[in-house]
Image (tube, rainbow, N blue to C red):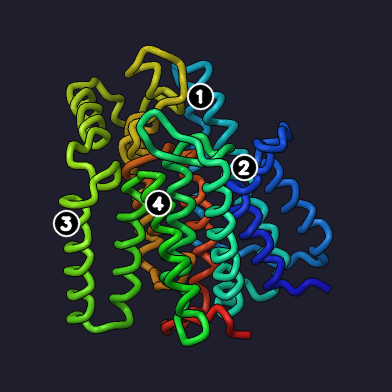
Amino acid sequence: MIKKIDIFNYLFTLIILLPVIFSFIFRITGIPIPSYLAAILLSGVVLFFTINNLFSVSISWLKFFLIIFFIWILSSIFYSPSLIASKVKFVEIIYNTIFPIIIFELFFISSKNKEIKFEYFNRYILRYSYLLLWFLLVTFLLFKQAEVSGRYTIPGVDNAIWFSRFIGMLVLVVICNDKPNLKNAGLYLLTIMIGFFLLFEGGSRGPVLSILIVFFIQQSYFISKKKLLLMVIGIILFLFIGFIFIGGYLFETDFYSIYARFDLFNALYDFDFNFIKGFGIGSFSILILGEDITYYPHNIFLELFFENGLIGLLLFIVILYLFFKSFNPNLINLLCIYFLIASLVSGDLPGNNNLFILLYISIYANKNYKLKNEKISLFNN
């Protein structure tokens, strides 16, 4: 009989951790199956064979506003000037965000105690993160492919930013979750080095910055301000040395991708916005570029304001307010912040699906949570 805590761990692995791995495997084997479709189908199978009883539905303001938020986003397709991008975005949101949330909701409805046992969850995810970082190192060394910009990724993950973001999530889990000791100190340090090597090769600065910010947030709960200040100074020195002596995309000084975003923001400065309801889902590309393609402003707040107006933007701000109001430094919440920071510089709503899935899970992550340093050893039983 599969334990309830194991079911949640399996679902989390399938929906959050494995889609990138599925993408790689399906690409090199030529299997024409979308990675998220595989994750959703497998999650559905897990639920089908493990759900025996249905209990009450948990009610919360965060869940309520997430539902209203997505109803507003998806309903904007009716007034969007886009015929192609709007439909693509509509389907992607349902496919990679709504369906996973429904799967987790069904799991929690079937659970009598609607909470996450972090002692077990943290250890489970930590082991998977170690395994996946080593797997991705071998995969990268054997199959890496270069982008025009000089950044690298792997087959099946065609954008180096997404590759770097996934690596960053795994590194964050290891850094924030493992407690090095005599047994695993070597493996811990080597795995962190592998993670940052892959991040440097992926060449995306956003995940590195996100890791540092989230790590400082976590440490602020457990160490003195003096130690935290020393850590910040050390990171600043590392970045300074990197810019001066290392170079490469990660430490480049012309920041062309940042300047490109500023150019985009400047182009929007005099734009005649529809302030209240926006122009509708998927409308950004056709109104800015004149082409009905998938294109976005690389900032979730600007995307929401442009396509869904002040209504969509304010709904999202309320969601974040409710999230931070009950914030505590458990792993789910830390991953939420990681993906929130990443959403400020890259991705659109479907591309930032992990943020919304984790925001939903955070409703249950904060139930009966007690603040403590939850770092564990990889080799603990």
Disc 2: CA contacts within 10 A as few (<14), some (14-19) or many (>=20): many
Disc 3: CA contacts within 10 A as few (<14), some (14-19) or many (>=20): few
Q: Which residue is mark 4?
A: 199
Q: Give coordinates of residue 181: x percent, y percent.
A: 46, 85
Identified by mark 3, the residue type is Phe
> Is residue 8 visible from the viewing direction of this image?
yes
Q: Which residue is mark 2?
A: 24
Q: Secondary structure at mark 3?
A: helix
Give the mark toward the camera: 1 or 3. 3
- Cα distance between the residues tagged 1 and 4: 32 Å
- Cα distance between the residues tagged 2 and 4: 17 Å
- Mark 2 and 1 residues: CB-CB less than 8 Å, in contact? no
Q: Quadrant of the C terminus?
A: bottom right
Drawn side of residue 347 relative to residue 27, left or right:
left
Q: Which mark is residue 240?
A: 3
Identified by mark 4, the residue type is Leu
- Residue sitting at 36 percent across and 60 percent down? 211
**Residue placed most toward the observer, 33 or 317:** 33
Q: Which residue is mark 1?
A: 86
Drawn side of residue 75 relative to residue 334, left or right:
right
Mark 3 or mark 1, which is nearer the start of the sequence?
1
Mark 3 or mark 2, which is nearer the start of the sequence?
2
Identified by mark 2, the residue type is Phe
**Residue placed most toward the observer, 374 or 99:** 374
- Cα distance between the residues tagged 2 and 3: 35 Å
Mark 4 or mark 1, which is nearer the start of the sequence?
1
